[in-house]
Image: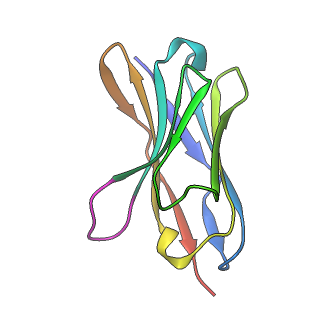
Amino acid sequence: QVHLVESGGGLVQPGGSLRLSCTASRSISSINIMSWYRQAPGKQRVLVASIIRGVFTTYGDSVKGRFTISTDNANTVYLQMNSLKPEDTAVYFCDANFGGLAYWGQGTQVTVSS
């Protein structure tokens, strides 16, 4: 099993930055894929970024060049979000793919508004 806790959400103005953190109950190196998803009100949850075995990264088209996923090589995954737009407003969830199962955190709210 993997327990995940997200933090770092909040209110930010358009063009601003935030860094989200996801702390896992086990080493990131033991988890196949760590991902960030987001879900806006009334919309489906969508993939934002993934990091595979702590090395290889992939991003959704809407965040490429603005968001960066990384790890501390211990048990935390980060999502650095720059040049934020109102359409980035959503609840952001951390996901761990471990042993063929998906584990989710509780989510953290990000609101981009002036």
User: On the image, which quarter does residue 27 sit in?
Assistant: top right
* Numbered disc total: 0
In the drawing, does residue 55 fall left or right of residue 3?
Answer: right
Residue 110: percent from the left, percent from the top?
55, 65
Residue at image position (56%, 55%) is: 64
**Residue 56 in the image: above or below residue 31:** below
Residue at image position (54%, 58%) is: 63
Q: How is the image coloured?
A: rainbow
**Residue 88 in the image: above or below residue 37:** below
Residue at image position (68%, 69%) is: 83
Regarding residue 27, the answer to whether it shows in the image is no
- Can you say which quadrant of the picture contains the N terminus? top left
The residue stretch that appears in magenta: 39-45
Residue 44: in magenta span:
yes
Residue 7: percent from the left, percent from the top?
61, 48
Instruction: Please identify the dominant SS of the magenta region.
Output: loop
In the drawing, does residue 104 fall left or right of residue 43?
Answer: right
**Residue 32 in the image: above or below residue 13:** above
- Can you say which quadrant of the picture contains the C terminus? bottom right
Residue 60: in magenta span:
no
Residue 85: percent from the left, percent from the top?
57, 75
- Judging depth in this view, the residue of 11 and 60 nearest the camera is 60
In the drawing, does residue 57 fall left or right of residue 61?
Answer: right
Residue 17: percent from the left, percent from the top?
72, 64
**Residue 54 in the image: above or below residue 17:** above
Regarding residue 94, the answer to whether it shows in the image is yes
Residue at image position (43%, 45%) is: 106
